[in-house]
Image: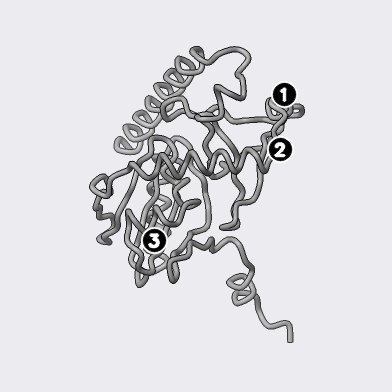
Amino acid sequence: MQVEIRTNFRRTARIIKDDRDFRRAASRMPKPVSWDWARPRLMPLLAQPCIDMPGEERIRTVAPVGCAIEFGIDLGGHFPIVDRVVAERWECSVEQLWATALENLAKRASIVQPSVVQHAVMSGRAFRMLQAPAGCASSLLLVPDQVKRLFGDHDQVLAAPGRHTLVSFPLDAPTLGIGEIVVDIEQGELTPLFLDPFAMYDGEVIWEGGGLDDLDDDLPDAS
């Protein structure tokens, strides 16, 4: 019980600090934010669980990998999310936002060095973990060439417990073991994503949540 209380206290302290840092960074943004200022800072983010408030709909689209993404303005690892009102003021289509954000992500990812990939062990299972670029490591799933450069081009299981973290497991790692580790990491994330796992097969990143094949296999035979 004491361990759980300490863990919850540390996570709450991190959330408070992150919120304070976010507000400090946001206070330095120009008002209103122009497209010229936002363009080099725009990044694609894997969409976190969210129910939009009326009149505050976030701009979202589906990435080629199959999952929903949204767009944030990078304030040093903190990301105000672009909503429909702002996009209309910029007179930018979703396609324009996606192209600009993806180009920025590719440039940012290209300067991440393989040496920052960490080796880790949880529940007796070895895996690798990346927490760069700051605040959006999970977005690297949208640029498979960078995933291959940092983690290798071999087949592997990938998971994005939160926006800050991308992890890679050997392809033969048991699904249950991967799930337990990912859930443990999610509990410590400031922005958990609760996504089905990804994988790299033959150099291509795919999302296991993008199809119904696995679900169909689990359904009982109606006959």
Looking at numbered disc 1 in the image, what kind of residue is underneath it? Arg
Which SS class for mark 1? helix
Label 3 vs label 1: CA separation? 43 Å
Up the image or down, 175 lies above or below 89; here it is below
Query: Which numbered disc flags the more N-terminal residue, 2 or 3?
Result: 2
Which residue, given by chain and number where applicable, does mark 2 sit on?
93
Dot 3: what SS?
A: helix
The reply to whether discs 2 and 3 touch (Cβ–Cβ < 8 Å) is no
Residue 140, image x and y in percent?
A: 44, 48
Which mark, by number, is residue 89? Answer: 1
Question: Which of the two discs, 3 and 1, sits closer to the camera?
Answer: 1
Residue at left offset 42%, top offset 30%: 77
| x and y, in percent, of residue 22 in the image | 46, 21
Residues under labels 2 and 1: Cα distance?
11 Å
Colour treatment of the image: one colour
Locate the C terminus by quadrant. Answer: bottom right
Judge by depth and name the residue closer to the eye, 85 or 108: 108
| Residue 114 circle label | none
Quadrant for the N terminus, please.
top left
Q: Are marks 2 and 1 in contact (CB under 8 Å)?
A: no
Q: CA distance from mark 2 to mark 3?
A: 38 Å
Where does the image place residue 53, in percent across and percent down from the top left? Answer: 71, 29
Residue 96 locus on image (x, y percent): 65, 39
Q: Look at mark 3 in the image and give the residue it sits on.
A: 178
For the residue carrying disc 1, how many other residues have a C-alpha within 10 Å: few (<14), some (14-19), or many (20+)?
Answer: few
Which residue type does callout 2 highlight?
Ser
